Every structure is written in structure tokens, then in C-alpha cells.
Amino acid sequence: MKKLLGITGVLLAVFVLTAILEPNFLTAYNLQNTLRWTGLFGIISIGAAFVIITGGIDLSVGSVVGLVGVLLPMFLIGQQWSIAAALVAVLVVLLAIGLLHGILVTKLNLQPFVVTLCGLLFYRGVARWISGDQTQGFGAGFDSFRQLAIGRIPITESFGVPIPFALMVVVAVLAAVLLNYTVWGRYMMALGHSEEAARFSGINTRRMVILAYIIGAVTAGLGGVLFALDVNSVQPAVHGNFYELYAIAAAVLGGCSLRGGEGSILGVVIGAAVLRLLYNAINILGIPTQLEFAIIGAVILVGVIADEVVRRISNIRVRDS
Amino acid sequence: MRTSLAAPGVTLPGNDRMDSALIVARGITKQFPGVVALREVTLSLNRGEVLAVIGENGAGKSTLMNILAGVHAPDAGHIAIYGEEMAISSPRHAMDLGISLIHQELSLLPNLSVGANMFLGREPHVAGYIRGRQIAQDAEAILARIGLEVSPDTPVSRLSIGHRQLVEIARALSAEARILIMDEPTSSLSLAEAETLFEVITELRARGVSIVYVSHRLGEVQALADRVVVLRDGEAVGELVGNAIQRNAMVRLMVGRDVSYAYRESPATPGDAVLEAHDLCTPAWPEYPLTLTLREGEIVGLAGLVGSGRTELLRVLFGVDPATSGSITICGAPVSLLNPRDAIAAGIALVPEDRGHQGLILEMSVRHNLTLSTLWREGHSWGWLRREWEAQVAADQIQNLGIKASTDTRAVRVLSGGNQQKVVVGKWLQLRPRLLLLDEPTRGIDVGAKEEIYRVMETLAQEGMAILFASSELEEILGLADRVLVMHEGRLTGELSRDDLSEEAIMHLATGQGVGATNPQA
């Protein structure tokens, strides 16, 4: 709970500060854009959080986004498949990827970092190869489909909630319910803290870890579909690059511990929002965009330090009371 | 005859003031979030004495030791060392002062060798290059003195827990410690290893080394200690010297009342067979088939030295390490135990050896730990957690077992060892197992909690559960078991009925002197 307060404070601070410094920040267009990107990154961050909560890590997110971004247009344009068929095919690929990661981690006992690092390299390579490194897109024909990524649900005349953000809310609610209200969520938390104790309690820990990697891959893929629909020109070599780091950063900012067993979905969503807000602030305030990574890195670091300081102070307070 | 224990060339300080205390701690107070761990405790340690510090779990023993060893700083109070008042700022500082703490939780690095562990942080080196030969030589000399026959090159991960404890002591000796603080040093040692340790302690004392000895085992304390300080609820409540060090007196001070060990009076007449294991082979000793039967309502002790295969047998019976061959039937039905889930489904529960890593999820709440193993069977509907059920189960078990926790939403980590162990037991009781396995169920927990665990085991047996418990404490095996199976190096070397039961009989079998005599099982 305290962690949530901290990150929410950062979110509000960046928001208010940017709004004061640059009134254009509060325009409907800009807010919609930020919300849309928050939705896109929030979705992949939620999946990354599941893997992190079970004590693993998924470095393949960005490459999965890239692979899906290549596959979807190829299925739709190249193969002339229907949208439903293309989505099912993509889903099958994602399930296979998640299952593969999970099996390699649990049955062969490989380290998650290594498995998904290889995934990062492998899926990127495959994406570039099957597309011949040619930019992929949907052309002009899939306008209504593309609304999933670029459309919005109108609230007032000028402002509407971007559909990716609404989708993220749906994913987040499902994820939070899974994590907090179901037996599987409890199992994931338990094994994230102590895999051995969870196994000794009769939990099928392997199955739960595999499930986490599947959730990670599927959300990365859902993000991939939306990112591809959004840009409409997917460059196989770079599309989705570094997105795994954004996802992990959002999860950590949102209170996930890389040691496992800790984290909340709301925190992760707010973490993703902070990252997008920072990105937006950098652009809109005219801060050199070369500084983007440096600023985001510094903010995460400050956040983690503040979190630690708050924890220590509250410990002292408990002692004094 | 042993050789001298002090390292050559070491001069012990304080020769000129034999009678002055090495450590005088006055008015030590320490608080942790939510608890006062120590309140105005005063303690002195003289040269060449064994000072036992005893008390129930949560009495503040470990905190006091951690303060003396520089792990924690006291909130109030003064410490004088060799007559000079000072603050012990860090474990390193304590070590430089000649104070070595041998941890309750073993603190060796398993991937490093015995020698490397002994000299960790103090490696002799030339310009950063570690002098391995010298480490090996020095380590070997010290290991020989404490009678531990392992090479300094052996990785610690290959040693038994008992041997690791001795390596810890060797490490302290190599640091030329003048004050040794031992926190529950024998809790994981076999009798033979403990005997070795006692000899070492006696010799060290003769050499003028002072030892602070923290233990739950009052028999050891009585045999070893020159002086006993009793802590209760963070306060020093009494001191016993010399002949006054008697079990009853100690227990009375520890719990604040008279306690008589209520041993199991009338063993139940065992009922039908619950577990029948035939020619079971553990992965650790695939060459020795084990055959045993457990019946309804009986409590069977599993005795043996550390490393005799007790834990391995229990792990096989709980499906942690599947048997390499052999058959198991539960209540007449053959079962295949490939993982703990299979065992739980067959009605088998295990209270494991390592409470912190296997028994509990320390960061999770008492409530969630108590329900974790039963969630799948009764704690959810279509995957949805039944929160009211969870609250009810936790409340029931907390009351049933007398678990002391301010609320059941606190992390298990903050509970005392005894209460943690009750949580482990509680999480299995909800499952109503037919066979309850316990591995060292009272290791490192206080007298009061031990008694409560015994009472629970007896009640469960009366209700018809079959219980198999492994223990290094002969006292509890003698007091609790209807019959005892003894293991030695992976074999079942004998079975003792209650009438044949004695420490000598168990040790005879546990040391392998009865090997090959009889097949223990009927």
C-alpha cells in the first residue's frame, strides 16, 4: 500500500509540474495520446509483472512485439487471412512461445534470464528473416480494425478515452482478479517468495511458472498487435526494441520485487503511466530527447531509493510507537 | 590426547587480571518493531568460563548475542570489553576484539571450500593473491583439533549440517577468538558430534577462552555451564551457579512456573496399517531397501545420527524425492508418490526439517500460510478464493494450537520459532492427514512450545493418525514414541518397542553396531 502511495505521488507530481510549466500539456489531444501509450505499455507491463512476481524475468517482450508486428500484417495482407484467423494464428504462436519459456525454465531448470535473452535474440531474428527486413503494414484497408489501437471512446466532443487504454483497464482488472482473488494468484505469490516451500505445500509450482510465462507472452503479443495497428509501418529490425525494459521498469516502479513474491497490478499500471508521462513531459517541455533514457533511469532510481527510505522511516516509527 | 587448541603464538589478553570480567554489559535495551526484545539486561562474562544463556524462544537470547557480536546496536546500555567501555560497531569489529558468533542459522557459503569459508574475509594474501597453501595448512590443523575429518578443499555443500556446524566453530577458532558465542550449537548435531563439541568446549575453557552458550537443551547446559543466566520476555530473571544448575530450577526460571515433562502415559493400541512401505529405496541410498509399517494411532520415532538417512526416508514418503524402487500402500491402496501433491492426495503430510525454507513462506501472513496446503481441496470455488473460509481456518488453528500472533495478517517471519513451527503443524491439520511425518519437529524451539507440539502429536495419534517423527533428541524419542526405528547410513538397523527402549539401545543401533542382526520390520 505504501508503495502505491509513493508511485502515485510521483505520477501526480510529474503531472502537475508539467501542466504548470507547459499549458499545452493539458490539451485533449496530448492527454489522449499519453493515455493511449500508457495503455499500450501498461498491457505489456502487466504480463512482465506476472513473470517477475513468480521470481522470473521476461526479456523477450520487445522481440515478441516485433514478431507479432511482422506476423499480423503478413497473415492479413500476404496470406489474405481473415482478421479472426490471423488473430488466432498469432495467439497460437504466443501460447507456444510462453509454453516454451515456461518449460525451459521449469523442466530443464534453465535460468529465466538466459532463456528469455535467447528469446529476445531469436524472435527478432525470425521477424527480420520472414519479412526479408521489409517494412510491414496494413495499407489503407483495415481502418476499422486499426481503430482498436488508434480509436477512442468519446466522452466529450473533444476528449475520448483511447481504446488501448480501455483495453488495458480490462486486462488490468482481469490480472488483478487473477492475482488477488484466485487460488492461482495466491500460488504465484507463494512460489515467488519460496518455490521450495510452495512445492512442499503441494502446489504444482511448475505449472504456475509456465502459466506466468504464458501470460507474459500473450500480453506482450496483445501489445504487439496494438502497437502494429498503431504505427501501421512495422520495421522488423527495430519495432518493439527495448520494450521489455520499459515493461520491467514499469513493474519495478509499481512495486514488484525482482526477488519475486511482491507486486500489485495497480502499481504496475501506475508505473507504466509514470514512464509515459515522463516521456511526454520531456517532449512537450522541449527537453532534449537524447536525455530521455537518462531521465527515466534517474526517476526509477530515485523512486526505488525513496521507497527504501520510506520503508526505513516507517520501521523506526513502528519501533517508537 | 588432544593437542592444544589455541593457535600457536596467540597470547590471550587479560592474563594480568584473571578475575576481571572480559565483557560487562549493563542495562542493555533493544526494541524491534512491535516488541521490546531486551529490557535492561545486565550480563558479565568471566575469563575461561562457560556461561549458558537460556530462555524460551522470544526471550531475547539471540538478540543479546547479536548485540555482543556487533550485529545489532543496543538502543540503550553500556558494554565494556576487557574493562574498556566501547560500542561494538560491526561483526568485523567484534571479531577484531576476539568475539566470534557461531550462528543459529548456519552462515557458511556452500559453494566455497571448508578452508575458504574458515578464512573468509581474513584470507592471508600477498598483494591480493590468496595464499591457498597456507589456508589449507592452517585449516587442516584446526580441523584436526576439533576432530573433523574432512579436507579443507571439500566444498561445504557436500558436508552434512552437523559437519557444517563444526566448520563454523573451526572458523571461529581460526579467527583466534577469545570469546565464543554459540547460539544453539548442538541443535543440528548428532550425539557423537555433540560429544566432540563438548570436548572442544571443555578444552577451550581450560585454555582461558570464554564461551557464551545459548541452548534449549538443558541437559547440555547442566553438564557444561559454570554459570547460567536465564532470560524471560527480554529480561534477565535469574542466575544459577555451580551445583544450583539443575534442570528443574532452570525450567522454573524460564517459564516462571514448575513444569514436569508430561511423557506419553499409555501408548494407544495400534490399529490397522496406514502406511506399508516395502523394499523402498531412497535416491541417496538406492542399494538399501527399507521396509516399514505404520499403524493408526501410533507414534513412531525415527532415530539416527545426522546423515543417517532419516530425512531422506521422510522425503521419499512425502514424494519430494521419489523412491527409486519399492512399493508404498496407504490404507491398503497402492500409491505412487512422485511429488508432494501425490503424497498430500494420499493423506500424507510432512513438517519438514527446514522451517524457514520448506515449511513456511516467511513473507506471507499467518493466515495464508495456514491455508496454503488446503486451498486446492476446500479453499476455493471455481478457482475463486474463499476468504471467509480462510479467516475461519486460521482462527481455528490459531486457537487450537495456541499460536501467539497479534493478528493473523502479520508475516510469519516476525513470529518466534515455536510459533512458526505451530503454523507449520497447523497448515497440515486442516488437511486431516492419515499419516503425519515430522522431521526434527522441535528443533530450535523453546520448552513451552515443545510441550505443546508433543501434546498435539499425542492428540492426533489418539484420534487415529499415524505419526512418524525423526528426531536427534533422544529425550523426546524416549518420551513420545510407541516404538522406534533406528537408521544408520541409509539402513534401518533396528526397531525398538517401548519395553526395549533406552538411550543405550538406540545409540547401539544408530552407530551401526547392530547392522545385519535382524530385519527390523515385522
Image (cartoon, grey):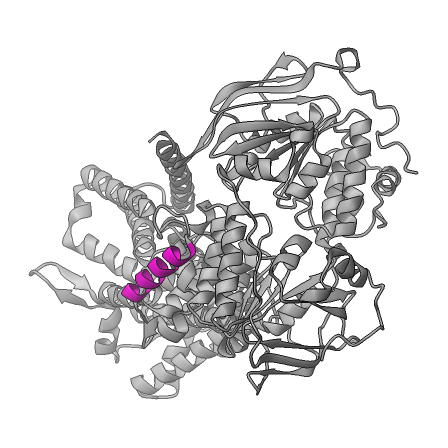
Return the x and y of residue A28 as percentages of the image width and height: 15, 54
Quadrant of the frame with the C terminus of chain B: bottom right
User: Residue A239, can we see it?
Assistant: no
Main SS class of the magenta portion in the image: helix
Q: In this view, does B72 lie above or below A147?
A: above
Side (left or right) of B409 relative to A147: right
Q: Which span is picked out in magenta?
A: B387-401
Return the x and y of residue B173 as percentages of the image width and height: 78, 34
Quadrant of the frame with the N terminus of chain B: top right
- Is B462 covered by the magenta stretch? no
Side (left or right) of B517 relative to A311: right
Return the x and y of residue B184 as percentages of the image width and height: 64, 42
Picture quadrant of residue A238: bottom left
Residue at image point 17% right, 45% down? A24
Picture quadrant of residue A10: top left
Return the x and y of residue A197 as percentages of the image width and height: 52, 61
Q: Is residue B344 above or below residue B397?
A: below
Which residue ends up furthest to the right in the rendered image?
A: B1
Side (left or right) of A130 relative to A2: right
Residue at image point 62% right, 73% down? B317
User: Residue A142, can we see it?
Assistant: yes
Could you say which is closer to the camera, residue B98 or residue B51? B51
Q: In this view, does B204 lie above or below B44?
A: below
Residue at image point 53% right, 37% down? B252
Residue at image point 72% right, 46% down? B165
Could you say which is closer to the camera, residue A51 or residue B303? B303
Side (left or right) of B386 relative to B59: left
